[in-house]
């Protein structure tokens, strides 16, 4: 903004300089008439050729009888009449009827303008040279400060985020509260021989609140807080990153006790010597300097490093060891209680209806992280405003959940009756299989209204959060995914391309069960293949085969067997509940959307789902 204002001032001055120069040029041109000596003027007066004389200070403008205009100059110290008389002009000739002498008083403003027309361009040029010099000096300063740290320092006097604004991660908050206490009362811990932790690494999936937690630490600590991104260290010039690391820690030491927060530290802390795409001289030098600053010879200062990453697996082991990062704080996806607390934080200050059940919303959002829930609340507020409501109601929150998961409704999408019927049976197939399987979730909603790229959707949520999944639960997930394709075959004796995403997911799930989870009876509890990330090809995962072709054939056979078994069971369930399948599909064709109550009114939960797991789900 500052450089933009300076450029604007320069343009204004240039414009003024151009106007002044034009005025000066015109003024010069206007005075470019033929100039004659005053004695020649006296001769012309005697001859009766002069019609008018205009005296302006020492300058004379002469108009002749033939309309010619000439100029002359008189002695400023002597009146014009006296000079003309001295040159032989008689008083009678001066007072003749054909001659008019107009003596004008000098104007102070005109004199100033005349002076300004000469001086102003030079002043403006001097000003321009001064600005250019300043710009060049600023560039030199920028070049000199190229190796300076770009970290932003926050004093913590006016915190915008505190621990009260963070919810759903109680254990992480407790760990970081202890760090704040270290900074506030270090003697309490030093008296017992405890050492202040050098670094805290925040690890978690994107959106779990790592940066928000760091902001809360900044607000709670009341000490200088330096915030910088890992990518801000790395430049195209080798050595700049290391210089910035040194400068950052020098600043932090001068303001100690202080906190340094490095966001996305994986940009600079990647494993050294990782081969193609993983090695970079500038990044390695920067990392080496960071390692020395964190635990080198001169580290007896109250500076705590907090770093955040969602990829701890690619960080250099030397960076992760105790003494550099003494603590690893994991911010996991919140459970149902945590999601309810996060919802409570985000609905504060918003006009929410008293009928809104935050627990019900939290139960309907398994797998959501803090960023998802913030987006959910915002979408609900937008929906309420769009519907001209004064408060946000439960319906807006439930609609917002669907928008976050699947995207907005595409009501304008035209679907012919035949395809609409296929979609209805497809979604009804998913819902019937879910309700029939003991290990499956609970159906919440079935709809044939398009959302995003999906022609329809079936929402089902677990009754409680799960950390582990058994083999039977994974098999149930596969059967549910294949329920749509099986319903198409049962109802129409034909299949469509509508199950492409289901088939992709079920194949991936079966491969994971066989190769990663050791859930194949034939291949046993073993992991097959090593997955490696090829950095130079982007986010592409390559698999290093550590098994023979014979085992590869068995893997393919096991995957195919699992998928086929799941498909057969889905068809068996739909054949058993064919009447309910037809009723649900027909109801969907009629009303397009079924909520949980309407669905269970048509198809109550079977007794076997409550009574135990059928033997066929293996």
Image (cartoon, helix red, strand yellow):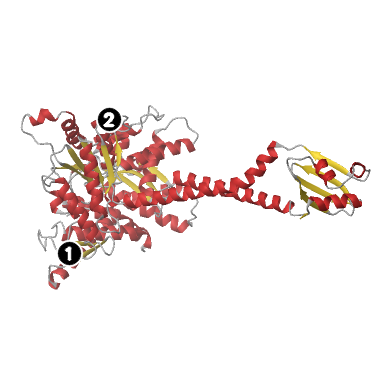
From mark 2 to mark 1, how far is it between C-alphas? 51 Å
What residue lies at 50% left-to-right and 55% top-to-bottom?
Answer: 414
Q: Nearer the viewer, mark 2 or mark 1?
A: 2
Q: Can residue 180 be seen in this view?
A: yes
Q: Is residue 138 left or right of residue 571?
A: right
34 over 257 or under it: above or below: below
Residue 107 x, y percent position in the rendering: 72, 37
What residue lies at 80% left-to-right and 48% top-to-bottom?
Answer: 61
Residue where numbered disc 2 is placed: 164
Q: How many labels does the image show?
A: 2
What residue lies at 14% left-to-right and 63% top-to-bottom?
Answer: 528
Mark 1 element type = helix
Q: In this view, does 462 lie to the left or right of 387?
A: left
Residue where numbered disc 1 is placed: 558
Quarter where residue 90 is shown: top right
Q: In this view, does 412 lie to the left or right of 69?
A: left
Residue 577 x, y percent position in the rendering: 30, 51
What is the quadrant of the C terminus in the image? bottom left
């Amino acid at each position: 903004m500052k450089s933009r204002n300076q450029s604007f001032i320069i343009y204004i001055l240039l414009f003024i300089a151009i106007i002044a120069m034009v005025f000066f040029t015109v003024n010069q041109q206007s005075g470019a008439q033929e100039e004659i000596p005053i004695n020649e003027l006296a001769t012309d007066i005697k001859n009766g050729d002069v019609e008018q004389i205009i005296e302006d200070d020492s300058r004379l403008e002469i108009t002749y009888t033939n309309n010619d205009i000439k100029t002359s100059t008189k002695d400023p110290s002597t009146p014009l009449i006296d000079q003309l008389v001295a040159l032989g002009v008689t008083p009678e000739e001066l007072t003749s009827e054909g001659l008019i002498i107009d003596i004008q008083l000098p104007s102070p403003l005109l004199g100033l303008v005349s002076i300004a027309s000469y001086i102003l361009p030079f002043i403006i040029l001097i000003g321009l040279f001064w600005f250019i010099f300043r710009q060049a000096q600023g560039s030199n300063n920028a070049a000199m400060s190229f190796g300076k740290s770009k970290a932003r320092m926050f004093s913590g006097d006016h915190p915008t985020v505190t621990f009260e604004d963070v919810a759903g991660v109680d254990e992480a908050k407790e760990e970081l509260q202890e760090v704040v206490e270290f900074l506030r009362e270090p003697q309490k811990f030093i008296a017992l021989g405890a050492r202040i932790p050098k670094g805290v690494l925040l690890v978690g999936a994107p959106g779990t609140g790592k940066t928000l937690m760091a902001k809360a630490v900044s607000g709670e600590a009341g000490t200088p807080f330096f915030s910088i991104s890992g990518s801000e260290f790395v430049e195209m010039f080798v050595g700049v990153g290391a210089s910035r690391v040194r400068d950052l820690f020098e600043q932090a030491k001068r303001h100690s006790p202080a906190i340094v927060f490095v966001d996305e530290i994986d940009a600079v802390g990647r494993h050294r010597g990782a081969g193609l795409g993983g090695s970079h001289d500038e990044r390695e030098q920067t990392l080496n300097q960071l390692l020395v600053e964190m635990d080198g010879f001169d580290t007896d200062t109250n500076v705590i490093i907090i770093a955040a990453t969602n990829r701890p697996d690619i960080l250099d082991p030397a960076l992760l060891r105790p003494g550099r990062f003494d603590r690893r704080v994991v911010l996991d996806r919140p459970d149902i209680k945590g999601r309810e607390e996060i919802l409570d934080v985000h609905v504060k200050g918003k006009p929410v209806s008293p009928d809104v059940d935050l627990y019900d919303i939290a139960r309907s959002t398994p797998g959501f992280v803090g960023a998802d829930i913030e987006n959910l609340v915002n979408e609900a507020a937008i929906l309420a405003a769009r519907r001209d409501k004064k408060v946000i109601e439960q319906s807006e929150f439930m609609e917002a959940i669907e928008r976050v998961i699947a995207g907005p409704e595409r009501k304008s999408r035209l679907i012919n009756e035949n395809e609409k019927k296929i979609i209805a049976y497809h979604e009804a197939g998913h819902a019937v299989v879910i309700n029939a399987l003991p290990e499956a979730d609970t159906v919440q909603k079935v709809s044939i209204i398009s959302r995003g790229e999906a022609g329809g959707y079936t929402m089902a949520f677990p009754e409680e959060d799960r950390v582990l999944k058994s083999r039977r639960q994974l098999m149930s997930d596969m059967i549910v995914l294949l329920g749509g394709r099986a319903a198409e075959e049962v109802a129409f004796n034909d299949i469509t391309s509508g199950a492409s995403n289901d088939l992709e997911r079920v194949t991936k799930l079966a491969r994971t069960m066989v190769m990663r989870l050791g859930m194949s009876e034939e291949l046993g509890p073993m992991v097959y293949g090593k997955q490696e990330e090829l950095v130079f090809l982007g986010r592409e995962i390559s698999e290093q085969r550590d098994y023979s072709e014979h085992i590869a054939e068995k893997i393919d056979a096991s995957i195919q067997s699992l998928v086929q078994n799941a498909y057969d069971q889905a068809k068996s369930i739909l054949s058993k509940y064919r009447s309910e399948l037809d009723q649900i599909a027909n109801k969907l064709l009629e009303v397009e959307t079924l909520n949980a109550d309407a669905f269970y009114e048509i198809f109550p939960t079977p007794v076997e789902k409550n009574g135990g797991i059928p033997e066929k789900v293996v």
